[in-house]
Amino acid sequence: MRIYETKHEILDDEIDVTGKLTLPKILSLSIGVSTKQSLAYGVGPEYTHAVGLGWVVLQHVITINRRPESGETMTISTHGKEFNPFLAKRDYTFVDEQGYKIIQVDSLYTMMDLKKRKMARIPTDLVDVFDPDRVKRVPHPDKPDRIAEDEAITCEQAYQVRYSDIDSNQHVNNARYLDWAQDPLGMDFLRTHEPKEVNIKFEHEVRWGEMIDVKIAQQADETKHQIWYGDELSAEVSIKWTQA
């Protein structure tokens, strides 16, 4: 496996009111590093889009030991871990200046035909440059904890998909879903709780102009989130928290 790494200093527009790196930015920085790796190996977005394909995230599992603060410099590394004709796994590791691993992101990807908006076979030459393990079956992460049918919804919020939410693959940037998921929890909760594990699974894409509805079931140390477009489930998220 070819490991790619880069350094990044946390900027003021990447932190929340606690002064720490936001959950959506963790995903944005992760995806950014894999894009840099793809560009360095000659298989970036321009290459994939030219053949009508685009990478799509199916699931992220984020494990957080601590969130870095503004001004800290991290080393972010990534590598293509495993793949078969339709699925690929990629890991991201955030290490602080003292050499401690502070964040781990495990991601599951597929490839989309941008015209048909359907899953496509992953071209072998596209992944060969990353030198991942070829496997018959790519293991799936555990699913997020689901809101039970009889479980009370503690908060709910509607959002409209904006132009700035859409990425170059013509669907909503996956980091935006974490914005939608955590925002209804409110300032008081988010200032006094630290996320330790985030599991987000994407089901159906939403598009520009559509209205989505976020529903949350909140417990003492876990929140479970569903993002709906009409009666279609677009994404599920579960977040485990500790007191800040």
Image: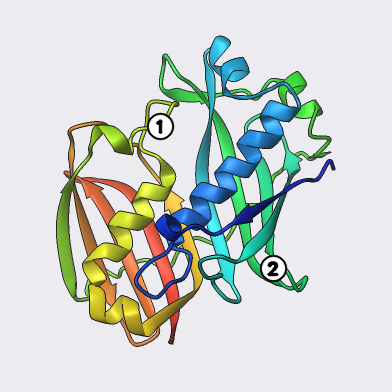
Quadrant for the N terminus, please: top right
Q: Secondary structure at mark 2?
A: loop
Spatial distance from mark 1 to mark 2, Cα to Cα?
Answer: 29 Å
Q: Which residue is nearer to you in this view: 209 or 225?
A: 209
At x 60%, y 66%, the residue is: 72
Left or right, residue 87 beside residue 233: right
Mark 1 residue crowding within 10 angstroms, few (<14) / some (14–19) / many (20+): few
At x 76%, y 26%, the residue is: 41
Q: Nearer the viewer, mark 1 or mark 2?
A: 2
The residue identified by callout 2 is: 96
- Residue 37 x/y as whole percent: 70, 35
Left or right, residue 129 beside residue 117: right
The residue identified by callout 1 is: 167
**Image height of 88 relative to 119, above or below:** below
- Residue 235 x/y as whole percent: 36, 51
Do we see residue 87 in this rendering? no
- Residue 67 x/y as whole percent: 54, 71
Give, as a three-letter code, the residue at label 1: Asp
Report the number of discs: 2
Q: Secondary structure at mark 1?
A: loop
Residue 171, image quadrant: top left
Quadrant for the C terminus, please: bottom left
- Residue 5 x/y as whole percent: 75, 48
Left or right, residue 15 beside residue 83: left
